[in-house]
Image: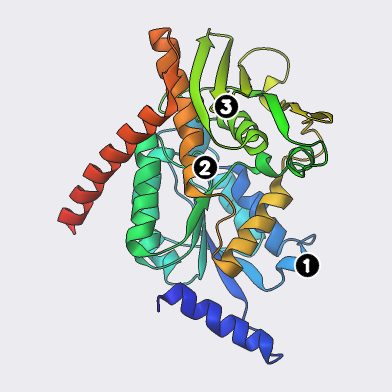
Amino acid sequence: MNRFLFILLITNSLLLFGQTPAIKRIGIIGLDTSHANTFAAMFNGKDANPDFADFRVTIAYPWGSKTIKDGYTRVPMFTERAKDLGLKIAESIDELLQEVDFVLLETQDGHLHVEQALAVFKAGKPVFIDKPMAASLTDVCLIFDLAAKYNVPTFSASSFRYIAPVLEATSGSKGRVLGADCFAPCKEEPSHPSLYWYGMHGVEMLFTVMGTGCKTVTRAHTNESDVAVGVWKDGRIGVFRGMRIGEEQYYHFGGFAYGEKGPVKLDSYVDYGYPGLMKEVVRFFRSGELPVPHETTIEIYAFMDASTLSYQTGKPVEIDVIIQKAKKAAKKKLAKIEVKK
């Protein structure tokens, strides 16, 4: 029996016999994004969710990228905020892993996630990996391969999967979703593929309401915007639009899902889905059940990679081909990691 299943067994036994289990400790890796303190406050702050009372964020390791200015310049500020929430600041990831039961991997730089996730997997700690899951589809597949190798559950998702209108669209109240148009800011970070940085929020909204099964992607690209059109295997069409100019584009997310019984406006101005995401993270920590299947996440990143290849070649790109190439490359990288061990 692995360590994670043993912890679940003990916790469930305590609940069965009316005993209060010990507080479960969460550690945060990466204080270079506002997400870290936003999520920590849901467990530790004055307005903490009472449903999370058996969890507490206890420690954080601040770094993060030391090359992406948008991240490293904010680490001191976010570190002070973390201290205000009662978090201990670790000197290393290894120190953090010795003191926690679960991990929120919040580091902004996807290039670091394979190394960081590998350390977490070796320690046997279930982990949520925030966006972007990695800086390439190959590394997304590699992280899932490593999770399987070490038998440690992990998932990744955008919080926009859990905004109220998206949940309405997926509830079936409007019947089957026949198509969708989603938009998001598409600010680019040169070190990452173009849609990975912010565009992926809109892409994940699209896949949440449409489901998986996209066959081909065609993308138009200019300095100001992107439009990626996906054709699903069942004939439905889903569209992502990313904007890089315009007043406050940075904050605007939304779209429409077209149901059999009418459209649903995917308006995100009420919330960014953070409470819903953390609710799913806690459920995941308690049960080990994945809120988002690995293959779904792989297809989301494959859509983004295929869209880039499409605008480079001017042709539609098949997603399955992109996925198979990435999985093959991930297996080669996994073998090298095993050799190093």
- In percent of width and height, residue 266 lies at 77, 31
Instruction: Name the front one of labels 2 and 1.
Output: 2
**Element on which disc 1 rests:** helix
The amino acid type of the residue labelled 1 equals Pro
Inter-mark Cα distance, 1 to 3: 33 Å
- Give the left or right position of residue 31, taking residue 149 as reference: right
Inter-mark Cα distance, 2 to 3: 17 Å
Residue under pointer 2 = 296
Residue under pointer 1 = 50
| Mark 1 closeness class: few <14, some 14–19, many ≥20 residues within 10 Å | few
- Depth check: 117 or 160 in front? 160
**Element on which disc 2 rests:** helix
Q: Residue at x 59, y 23 (%)?
A: 235
**Element on which disc 3 rests:** helix
Instruction: Name the front one of labels 1 and 3.
Output: 3
**Would you say residue 120 is visible in this rendering?**
yes
The amino acid type of the residue labelled 3 equals Gly
Give the label on residue 99, or none.
none
Q: Residue at x 70, y 27 (%)?
A: 178
Vertical order, 91 against 5 (above or below): above
Task: Say whether disc 2 or disc 3 marks the residue closer to the N-terminus.
Answer: 3
Task: Say whether disc 2 or disc 1 marks the residue closer to the N-terminus.
Answer: 1
Residue under pointer 3 = 199
The amino acid type of the residue labelled 2 equals Thr
- Give the left or right position of residue 23, taking residue 254 as reference: left
Q: Quadrant of the C terminus?
A: bottom left
Q: Residue at x 25, y 49 (%)?
A: 334
